[in-house]
Image (cartoon, rainbow, N blue to C red):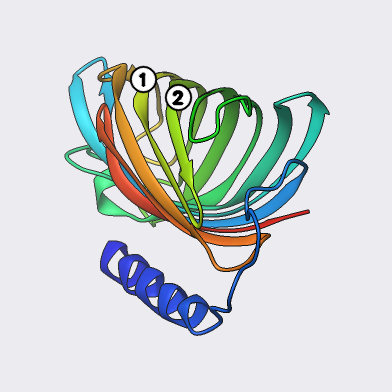
Amino acid sequence: MQRLFRASLVVFACAWAGAVWAYDDSPFMAGGSTSLELGSYDTVFSYPNGGHEAHVARYGLAFSEPVAPDFDFMLLGGYLGLDVDGDPIASSQDYSGRFLGLMGHYESTEGDYLNFSAAVGYTWHDVDGASSFAPSEIQWYETWGEAGPVIRTRPWRFVVGGYYQSLDGSETDGGAANQFRRFTAGSPAGAYAGVAYYLDRTGSVGIYATSGARHGVSIVFKRDF
């Protein structure tokens, strides 16, 4: 599933790149936005019997709206895929489901080129897996915080910084397994970096990567308004 997901990222990126057109004036708009995110990442779920690496794939939409100067409120959600290494139940089947979250985002606009960005979010994840041995459900709640500088020089936007994640989750296995286990984040912190290119004054495509507690990559197609 991971290889298929990464291949789809390439297809979407190529399709979007074919729509490039010229921009004029500053492409960085102050206001709301709609974005499509395609990403995958690996992180560790810490169970009572030890850590197990989880492979997460996300296809999601996000809608943001300004609520104060330099501050946006965002609603995000979409499709979720999950594989867990070394878990007796979760490693034998693919999980799929949904995620839904809220995020507050601040980005200063006083500087001509260099500014500061910070975000705090809370997201619910719920996936199901089914087999003749043990139908299973995995849920987790994620608290996320990030902060770092932003460099804006048309038509480019560069970001880099650090993040913190906290996970509170559970796995419920039915059938012959008949067990309930909780898990948390195997590691809490890491770094991120990204670059976005504005195709015109309101449309951009960006690539973002994380390392540390969560290591992965995502492509974001965004339209400001």
- Res 105 quadrant in image: top right
Closer to the camera, 106 or 85?
A: 106
Residue 172 in sight here: no
Q: Position of residue 11 (x, y in %)?
A: 40, 79
Q: Which residue occupies 36% across, 20% down?
A: 183
Q: Residue at x 27, y 20 (%)?
A: 46
Examine the rendered structure and indicate whether residue 43 appears above or below residue 223.
Answer: above
SS at badge 1: strand
Residue at disc 2, secondary structure: strand
Q: Which residue is mark 1?
A: 183
Q: Tell me if residue 108 can be seen.
A: yes
Q: Which mark is residue 29?
A: none
Using a 10 Å C-alpha cutoff, classify the residue at mark 1 as few (fewer than 14 neighbours), some (14 to 19) or many (20 or more): many
Whole-Å distance between the Cαs marked 2 and 1?
A: 6 Å
Q: From the viewer's perspective, is 62 left or right of 143?
A: right
Q: Which residue is nearer to you in this view: 90 or 20? A: 20
Residue type marked 2: Ser
Q: Based on the displayed image, in which of its 4 quarters is residue 122 positioned? A: top right
Q: Residues within 10 Å of mark 2 (few under 14, many from 20)?
A: some
Indicate the quadrant containing the N terminus: top left, top right, bottom left or bottom right.
bottom left
Q: Compare marks 2 and 1 and give the one earlier in the sequence.
A: 2
Assess whether mark 1 and mark 2 are in contact (beta carbons under 8 angstroms): yes
User: How many numbered dots are placed on residues in this image?
Assistant: 2
Q: Position of residue 187 (x, y in %)?
A: 26, 18
In the image, what residue type sits under mark 1? Phe
Q: Which mark is residue 170?
A: 2
Residue 180 placement, left or right of 214: right
Position of residue 173 measured from the top left corner of the image (x, y, whole percent): 42, 35
On the image, the x and y values in percent for residue 118 come to 53, 22
Residue drawn at (58%, 53%) of the image:
60
Position of residue 153 relative to residue 186, above or below, is below
Q: Nearer the viewer, residue 161 or 56?
A: 161
